[in-house]
Image: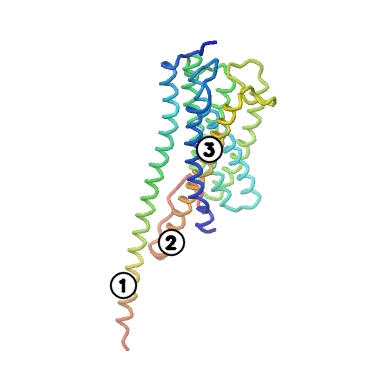
């Protein structure tokens, strides 16, 4: 029995199906990269807040008369 | 709940996913023979069927976590249910697109409306496509989690019922490869299929773990930011479809 579609005709369909899967995984990775950059931005904000808090405490300690 | 609990085993799981998925695809093209009837186009089977099976199992898993959430009230189960359904939806999109490509190559049509397997999968997909809008439409986090859990349980019960109904249908164009008799695949095809299925299953678990780790990291950071800023600078949590831990 000969196959329904010869290799030349079937090739693009098979390639398209596997490329769809690859594209889905890559889109997912790209979305995760965006989320990761948001998390790293939040960490930078937190570090800034911590620095400001330390500086304020230092200032308060210096302002207290001995 | 610690960050380590979600991210535990993420690196070996990621490596295993890559090995199984790439190994499975290599077997598809270099080991499994061409099918006698369909020829080369049947190679889509090794991608399309695992995508569909894992997506459906993921939907059921979402329902199981929904039950666990309602029983315990632990929001971690709600988060797991949300993530399982979220990742399953992505895989279901893949199953629909690859199935459509295969249908065009085999039957000459992108979609066949009188085919129960295709239409029932589309119904399941559309049902779960409503899950995120449902969550987003409810502002109160408690109610959001409860309603979403009920939705996940009902949907999760619908999936196997739907599967059995389709199996019971008499006329169908869609082939039945996996049956109670063990199917008609030769050993090399069966092994390739099982490796592809295992790869897809491990990829699903890995993606779920990535999503859980990322979500938990965001929640932890947000709450830390609020604590550091002090109550004066408190900013209300942005409305979201995702569960708030």
According to the picture, the residue beneath numbered tag 3 turns out to be: B199
Q: Tell me which residue sits at (45%, 23%) in the image.
A: A14
- Is residue A4 rendered to the left or right of residue A48? right
| Mark 1–mark 2 distance (CA, rounded to whole Å) | 19 Å
The crowding category of the residue bearing disc 2, from other C-alpha atoms within 10 Å (few below 14, some 14 to 19, many at least 20), is some
Subunit of mark 3? B
* In this rendering, the label closer to the viewer, 1 or 3: 3
Indicate the secondary structure of the residue bearing disc 1: helix
What x and y, as percent, mark residue B39?
50, 17
Residue closest to the far right: B181
Marker count (numbered): 3
Q: Residue B224 bears which disc, if any?
A: 2
The crowding category of the residue bearing disc 1, from other C-alpha atoms within 10 Å (few below 14, some 14 to 19, many at least 20), is few
Q: Tell me which residue sits at (61%, 44%) in the image.
A: B66
Judge whether A58 appears above or below A27 on screen: below
- Is residue B210 rendered to the left or right of residue B165? left
Subunit of mark 2? B
- Is residue A11 rendered to the left or right of residue A52? right
| Mark 1–mark 3 distance (CA, rounded to whole Å) | 52 Å
What x and y, as percent, mark residue B62?
58, 41
Indicate the secondary structure of the residue bearing disc 2: helix
What x and y, as percent, mark residue B95?
51, 29
Quarter holding residue A47? bottom left
According to the picture, the residue beneath numbered tag 1 turns out to be: A55
User: Camera-side residue: B37 or B132?
Assistant: B37
């Amino acid at each position: 029995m000969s196959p329904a579609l010869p290799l030349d005709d079937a090739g693009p369909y098979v390639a398209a199906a596997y490329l769809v899967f690859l594209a889905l995984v890559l889109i997912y990775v790209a979305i995760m990269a965006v989320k990761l950059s948001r998390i790293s931005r939040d960490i930078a904000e937190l570090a800034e807040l911590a620095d400001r808090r330390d500086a304020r405490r230092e200032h308060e300690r210096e302002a207290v008369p001995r | 709940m610690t960050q380590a609990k979600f991210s535990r085993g993420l690196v070996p799981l990621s490596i295993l996913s890559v090995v199984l998925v790439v190994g499975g695809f290599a077997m598809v093209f270099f080991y499994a023979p061409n099918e006698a009837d369909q020829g080369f186009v049947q190679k889509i089977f090794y991608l399309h069927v695992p995508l569909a099976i894992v997506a459906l199992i993921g939907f059921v898993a979402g329902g199981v976590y929904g039950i666990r959430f309602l029983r315990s009230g632990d929001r971690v189960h709600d988060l797991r249910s949300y993530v399982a359904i979220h990742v399953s939806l992505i895989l279901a999109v893949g199953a629909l697109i690859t199935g459509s490509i295969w249908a065009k190559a085999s039957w000459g049509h992108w979609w066949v409306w009188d085919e129960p397997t295709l239409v029932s999968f589309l119904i399941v997909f559309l049902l779960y496509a409503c899950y995120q809008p449902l969550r987003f439409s409810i502002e109160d986090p408690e109610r959001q989690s409860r309603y979403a859990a009920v939705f996940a349980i009902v949907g999760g019960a619908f999936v196997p019922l739907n599967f059995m109904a389709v199996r019971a249908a008499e006329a169908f164009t869609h082939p039945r490869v996996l049956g109670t008799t063990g199917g008609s695949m030769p050993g090399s095809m069966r092994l390739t299929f099982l490796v592809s299925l295992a790869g897809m299953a491990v990829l699903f678990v890995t993606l779920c773990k990535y999503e859980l780790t990322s979500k938990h990291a965001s929640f932890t950071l947000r709450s830390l930011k609020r604590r550091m800023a002090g109550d004066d600078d408190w900013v209300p949590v942005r409305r979201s479809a995702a569960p708030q831990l």
